[in-house]
Amino acid sequence: MNPILEFLTRKRGRKKLLLSDLLSYLYLLLGVVFMFGPVLWLVLSSFKTPLEIVRFPPRIFPYRQQTVSIEGNEEELPLFTVTMENGITRELAQVRRIGLEAQMIDPLDPSEIVKVPIDKRVPVEKISFDLENYITGANRFNFGRYLFNSVVVTLFATLLTLLVNSMAAFALSKYKFRGRQTIFLVMISTLMVPLSVVLVPIFLVITRVGWNNNLLGIIVPVAATPTGVFLLRQYMLTIPNELMDSARIDGASEWRIYSQIILPLAKPALAVLTIFSVMWRWNDFLWPLIVISRSEMFTLQVGLASFQGELNVQWNLILAMTVLTLLPITIVFALLQRHITTGIATTGLK
Amino acid sequence: MKKTLKIKRFFEGISKGLSTFVVSATDLLFGSLQKLIGVKGMPYFFVLPNLLIFGIFILYPVLLNFVYAFTGGPSFFPDERPFVGTGNFERLFACESILQPNSCTEDIFWRAVHNTIFFVIFQVSLMVLFALITALVLNRKIKFRGFFRSVFFYPCLLSPIVVALIWKWLLQDNGLLNGIMTSLGFSRLPFLVNAQWAQFWVIIVSVWASMGFYTLILLAGLQSIPPDLYEAASMDGANKWKAFTKITMPLLMPTMLVVIVLSLIRAVQVFEVTYAFTGGGPGTATLYLVQFIYNYGFSSPNKQYGVAAAASLLMAGVLIVLTLAQFAARREEAY
């Protein structure tokens, strides 16, 4: 066998790379293209100019025509490579275009104007990650406001979820009281009924409470997640009751036992619930869509949905705003990926 | 360096002071509450906030939904709605044959039912198949396992609207996929305009967006299979295929069951991604049950809350059966 190939396919332990290994890596490679390709395409496209974005067939990288600033012209002039009549190519800047003829000047010698038929010039292009789409988009899209709303909702909904769920889980796991079983069963049984099925009555309740167009309407109703209670209760069941008994002998109140003993011990489960809650609330779409109709109360997701409907054709701006919307959660994931993936694997929640 | 340390200490001091204050203040408050209602009363205090939110925003709407389902009329407020008994359900079932949506009074409902069944069958089987293959591959001794696992999981983090926009951009008439098609010498395809293509892509996109989650669960299931079983099998002369069919599959079955039922439940409820991706179109090609309910309750000009609620009760029935199956599957997994 070719020694180079042999070296490349050598593996620790086994002599050669097996066919099944090759197939595995091939599968994973295709998987990476399929799973991550669309996102990468979005990011690359988000840097394209309006002209480049409607180009078909599309080019992979965001090309942008080069411009030069020349004295006597207020705006920067676009650069072209021009094939002259004598066959020589020159790099010229276009001053204006009149019909089928372009008036061009040489950046090195701006005094003389050269007249060129437009089919003899090709734009000078360079791959450029210009932030123009992001800046224009953010001005029209009110990104700051939506981001603020999304952060407020995610933060407070998560804090509220952690507080009320851990309190309930504490009661359900550490006390024997009348109604305990009933409460637990009712909560678990509503796990089956998704929010989407009771849209109309839940909207009625929100209207009666007066939380339409109020961030409270997307923070409070979703805070009492049965999943969270269930997850925390299962974890708290593993904390020995003796700890509580000895604290009681020392004169600690029940609240002190909850806040000073049980909560610190339940940190791993609380961490998992935090991750889930942040993911749920950040990505919530249907619920805010129903509760919020005033644009200054939009979260990023609803804002993006309405932005898309409003502009319809200006893909370059939509794409840039989509990237901005997925950026925060991507950064969080990049930092915490190990915790997130193992958390999901062990609890089976999403 | 010294300055940042000082600032850090300062903030640490503040946060410590603040937390001590909160702890002692709440302790004082709830300690006196305990004196008032006794230790026996405290568990009720602990469940109260959760129970209040839960009762008002989940349980009460679930019960109200029954009121809507058995009353008619255009009013949004339950007390103004006349009782119609099973009228809404009869309306939904007013069909010559439920296999032909055109023969029904509520033809769109039955179209949504048919679409949903079609979607569930194909989406769940595709997803479970690919999640299983991916988990099996990731469970091998491969390099960069953490990286690959994250890549497969990443789309699960994206919101429905982001997922929809990513794929719309890819599949639109001038999109990348059509670009590849033309450069390979084919003509452009109407991916989002043609009904069959739209149905196909809705399935692909929803598999893309949620496969990673099931892959992780299956991977955890695979990793909980004790490795000495495989060693024992290979000592007994069993080949790879035999080890797979006799050890991996039977031991993974409980996890598989959970995955199948969970994905069934999610697939029946498909809404957000399709709403943002195709909006139910073209026509009613990708209109599924939840969107039918949403349209009737929120977006259509003549809202029919009763019919929407009746449809949602029917759907809840299906979901309850599926969830009970899930609990049974989980119990089996526990043994």
Image (cartoon, rainbow, N blue to C red):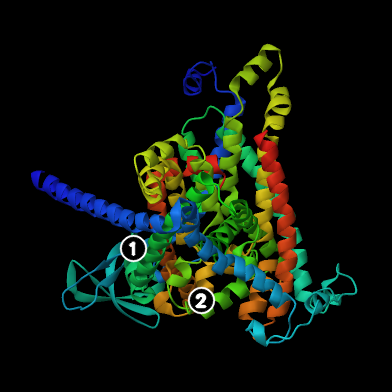
Q: Quadrant of residue A122?
A: bottom left
Residue B239 visible in the shown view: yes
Outermost right residue: B96
Instruction: Indicate the quadrant containing the N terminus of chain B: top left, top right, bottom left or bottom right.
Output: top left
* Residue at position x 36%, y 70% in the image: A143
Which residue sits furthest left? B2
| Quadrant of the snapshot with the C terminus of chain B | top right
How far across and how far down the image is residue A342, in percent?
A: 49, 39
Q: How many numbered marks appear? A: 2
Host chain of mark 2: A
> Quick check: A71 above or below A99?
above
Residue labelled with disc 1: A124
**Residue neighbourhood size for the residue with mark 2, other residues' Cα within 10 Å, grouped as few (<14), some (14–19), many (≥20):** few
In the depicted structure, whether residue B54 falls above or below residue B153: below
Considering the numbered disc 2 on the image, is that residue within a helix, a strand or a loop?
A: helix
Residue under numbered circle 2: A309
Residue at 43% over, 69% down: A299
The disc at residue A296 is none
Percent position (x, y) of residue A229? 52, 52
Q: Is residue A326 visible?
A: no
Q: Please name whichever residue, A114 or A145, is drawn nearer the observer in this view of the structure.
A: A145
Q: Secondary structure at mark 1?
A: loop
Against B305, is B190 above or below? Answer: above
Give amino acid for label 1.
Val
Where is residue A24? Give x, y as percent. 58, 33
Amino acid on which disc 2 is placed = Gly
Q: Position of residue B140 (x, y in %)?
A: 56, 29
Cα distance between the residues tagged 1 and 2: 34 Å
